[in-house]
Amino acid sequence: MQRNLKAFILFGAALIWVCGGGMAMAMVMNPPTFSQYFGELIFYITGDWEKWGGLFTFLQGNQYFMYGFLLLITVIPAIFAMHLLIVGAKHFDHSGNQILFFPLFARIVHFIGAASFSALTITGLLIVSGQFFDGGSFIRLARFIHIFAAITAFPAVISMLIIWFKDMLPAPCDIKWIFILGGYLSKKKVPVPAKKFNAGQKMWFWCAIPGGLIMLATGYIIWDFSLPLDIIRMSTLLHNVLGMIIVAFFLTHCYMSIFAIAGSLESMKTGYKPEEEVHILHSLHKYKESDVIPPPAHH
């Protein structure tokens, strides 16, 4: 395994060296100006910008973004409502030992991130539906709140990336978790293959954190009117499409965190999960004895 990995790395390095050497030789023989080089690079990445203008006008003019978001916020909650009625929430014994999952700093960061993402989602939906509300001061207020929420979300996103990067890396057990959908389609409480964070939480993390940073970058570009119009259009397209993906994951995360597990909001507040919940939903998580606190003594 290590030999194959080393061979792959060496092959990649050789390929980069050869390609880079060829490009460098071409530049020495026929040196381009900086503007030419930048233009060719952007064209290679994005293609013909004028095509984006037509696509943007088609999607925005027909309000397809608004209909797409409306479909998401209608269908996804309906599916989860059916799950809650048919399967129901999972209940665990909260009277026994409690296991520390989220230290104080992580809880504060998560709260700021949750509040920011909620504000961004709500105001983003209002902004994309601005034509339905006929614009006006209400939508302008939503825009200002959207910008403020983006500013507060940035440090939270960076902090969560640092705090949970290691725990969010993929693991073999995640594949098993996906195949059984975390056991959420069954009323039985059977140990699920998951470490501190399950595959669903990891998918949300890798969607929200890198995706959130891209959303922040494209959102900044959208407000920078000094840039060429086609760049703003392209950024708006990416912002809206990625926004749909993040909203879908966000709604899923909210349902799983608030409704699918009874009492889970308490663990977000205190940082502790009941021992039974950990042994069932995070059966592969290895915690320290110092992270366990016994139930309060009854007199």
Image (cartoon, rainbow, N blue to C red):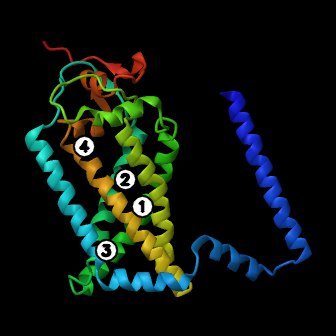
Q: Secondary structure at mark 3?
A: helix
Type of residue at label 4?
Met
**Which label lies toward us, 2 or 3?**
3
Which numbered dot is residue 256? 4
Q: Position of residue 178 (x, y in %)?
A: 34, 37
Q: Is residue 293 above or below residue 72?
A: above
Q: Are marks 3 and 4 in contact (CB under 8 Å)?
A: no
Which residue position is annotated with label 1? Answer: 152
Q: Residue at x 71, y 40 (%)?
A: 8
Q: Earlier in the sequence, mark 4 or mark 1?
A: 1
Which numbered dot is residue 112? 2
Which residue position is annotated with label 3? Answer: 65
Type of residue at label 2?
Ile
Q: Residue at x 36, y 70 (%)?
A: 146
Type of residue at label 3?
Phe
Q: Earlier in the sequence, mark 2 or mark 4?
A: 2
Q: Are marks 1 and 2 in contact (CB under 8 Å)?
A: yes
Residue 109 in view:
no
Q: Position of residue 116 (x, y in %)?
A: 35, 59
Q: Secondary structure at mark 2?
A: helix
Q: Earlier in the sequence, mark 3 or mark 4?
A: 3
Q: Residues within 10 Å of mark 3 (few under 14, many from 20)?
A: many
Q: Residue at x 35, y 75 (%)?
A: 144
As rendered, which of 241 and 128 lies closer to the eye? 241
Q: Secondary structure at mark 4?
A: helix
Task: Give the quarter of the image for residue 23.
Answer: bottom right
Q: Earlier in the sequence, mark 1 or mark 2?
A: 2
Give the alpha-carbon distance from disc 1 to disc 3, as whole Å: 25 Å
- Specify whether 150 is left or right of 22: left
